Each structure stands twice: as C-alpha cells, then as structure tokens.
C-alpha cells in the first residue's frame, strides 16, 4: 500500500476547525461503511467554501462529458 499526504497551511483557525469537522464526519461514514447523500454534506460548508467548487448545470455537465470523451487517448 502506498502512503500519501496532503500538505496545507492554516491561516484561519475558524476555517481549519470547520475542515476538521468535515474530516471527522467523513471518517465516521468511512468507519461505518455508510455514505450520506451528496446533498447531506452541504451543511458542512459555508458559501465561501462552496464557491471553490463547480456547480454545473445539466447542459454544462453534458458538454463537459462530450468534450472529455472526445479527447483522444495518447
């Protein structure tokens, strides 16, 4: 088994505590082998955190996959 890690800097203790809370919830689900629905996770993120993700419309997602699968494999 290969090991890996994520390195980051903490510049806001409030946001770090929010990250720890999410991590603990993910760990809880993993340990119980029970995963919540995607929308159930949204309560753990504020507007600022959610702004870092892409929330495509159905049309945008369709176009994304069309382009992804049209890309030739080297």
Image: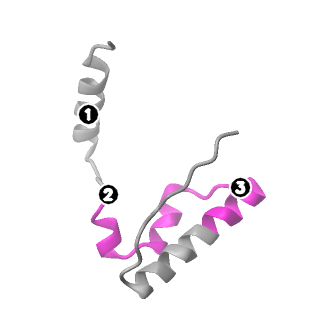
Question: Residue 51, how many percent across, how many down?
Answer: 27, 65
* Residue at 61% over, 58% down: 36
* Residue at 43% over, 86% down: 13
Question: Residue 12, how many percent across, how many down?
Answer: 37, 84
Q: What element carries label 2?
A: loop
Q: Distance between the residues labelled 2 and 3?
A: 24 Å
In front of the other: 21 or 9: 9
Q: Earlier in the sequence, mark 2 or mark 1?
A: 2
Number of callouts in the render? Answer: 3
- In the displayed structure, would residue 71 be above or below residue 15? above
Give the overall secondary structure of the magenta segment: helix
Quarter of the image where the C terminus is located:
top left
Q: What element carries label 1?
A: helix
Q: Which of marks 2 and 3 is nearer the N terminus?
A: 3
Horizontal arrangement in the rendering, residue 24 relative to residue 71 (left or right): right
The answer to whether mark 1 and mark 3 are in CB contact below 8 A is: no
- In the displayed structure, would residue 10 be above or below residue 54? below
- What residue is pinned by disc 2? 53
The mark found on residue 34 in the picture is 3
Question: Residue 9, how many percent across, how many down?
Answer: 40, 72
In front of the other: 46 or 71: 71
Q: Earlier in the sequence, mark 1 or mark 3?
A: 3
Quarter of the image where the N terminus is located:
top right
Q: Is mark 3 on a helix, strand or loop?
A: loop
Residue occupying the far right of the picture = 32
Decide whether residue 55 is among the magenta residues: no
The mark found on residue 64 in the picture is 1
The answer to whether mark 2 and mark 3 are in CB contact below 8 A is: no
Where are the magenta residues, as a range?
A: 25-53
């Amino acid at each position: 088994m290969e090991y890996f890690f994520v390195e980051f800097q903490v510049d806001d203790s409030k946001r770090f505590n929010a990250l720890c809370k999410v991590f603990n919830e993910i760990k809880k689900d993993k340990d119980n082998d029970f995963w919540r629905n995607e929308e159930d996770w949204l309560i753990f993120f504020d507007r600022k955190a959610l702004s870092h993700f892409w929330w495509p419309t159905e049309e945008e997602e369709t176009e994304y996959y069309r382009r992804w699968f049209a890309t030739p494999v080297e």
